[in-house]
């Protein structure tokens, strides 16, 4: 039950297009404004795709270095440079993601449904682009 609550969200309306109803100064939506899920499966899929692509790129560099360099000292230094670059890039990515999360948390305290719909639409375009990239790259990775 705890696991399913991470991925579920109860909606009062049937579709994703919940209409905003304004009565005097208070605007409310048809959507139940309960807590958002802790983990969104769409975002998790995008992160998984990016991590997979990063691992494949890093392993390609490491394979190229291993097969190309004859001098063991240069090979060791080159592999270390790839590893450290990947580490620092990952650390910067985590810091940027944390900063965005903190910024969105602070900004969402007075957040209108209009902007939520715009952000949702843009995120769907980004997700579609990521799926397109993955669809194009998987045959390359498999050598097809």
Image (tube, rainbow, N blue to C red):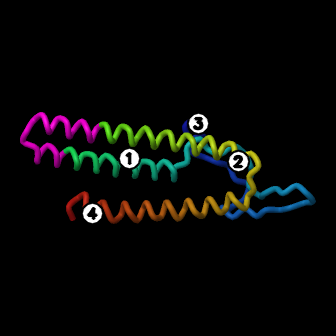
User: Over which residues does the magenta segment extend?
Assistant: 63-83
Quarter of the view holding residue 13: bottom right
Disc 1 is placed on an element classified as helix
80 part of magenta stretch: yes
Residue receiving disc 2: 108
Disc 3 is placed on an element classified as loop
Disc assigned to residue 139: 4
Residue receiving disc 3: 1
- Rendering coords of residue 40 (x, y %): 55, 48
- N-terminal label among 1 and 2: 1
Residue drawn 45% across and 43% down?
Answer: 93
Residue sitting at the far left? 70
Crowding around mark 4 (Cα neighbors within 10 Å: few <14, some 14 to 19, many 20+) is few
Residue receiving disc 1: 51
What's the distance in space between the residues labelled 2 and 3, CA to CA? 28 Å
What's the distance in space between the residues labelled 1 and 4, CA to CA? 18 Å
Crowding around mark 2 (Cα neighbors within 10 Å: few <14, some 14 to 19, many 20+) is few
Residue 7 appears left or right of 11: left
- Residue 95 in the image: above or below residue 137: above
Residue 117 appears left or right of 61: right
Q: Nearer the viewer, residue 122 or 40?
A: 122
Residue drawn 17% across and 46% down?
Answer: 63
């Amino acid at each position: 039950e705890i696991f399913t609550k991470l991925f579920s969200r109860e909606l009062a309306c049937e579709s994703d297009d919940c209409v905003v109803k304004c009565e005097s100064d208070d605007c409310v939506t048809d959507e139940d404004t309960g807590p958002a899920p802790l983990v969104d499966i769409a975002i998790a899929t995008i992160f998984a795709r990016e991590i997979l692509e990063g691992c494949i790129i890093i392993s390609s560099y490491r394979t190229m270095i291993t097969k190309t360099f004859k001098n063991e000292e240069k090979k060791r230094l080159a592999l270390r440079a790839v590893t450290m670059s990947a580490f620092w890039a990952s650390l910067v990515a985590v810091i940027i993601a944390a900063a965005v999360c903190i910024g969105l948390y602070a900004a969402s305290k007075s957040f209108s449904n209009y902007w939520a719909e715009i952000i949702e639409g843009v995120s769907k375009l980004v997700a579609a682009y990521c799926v397109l990239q993955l669809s194009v790259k998987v045959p390359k990775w498999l050598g097809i």
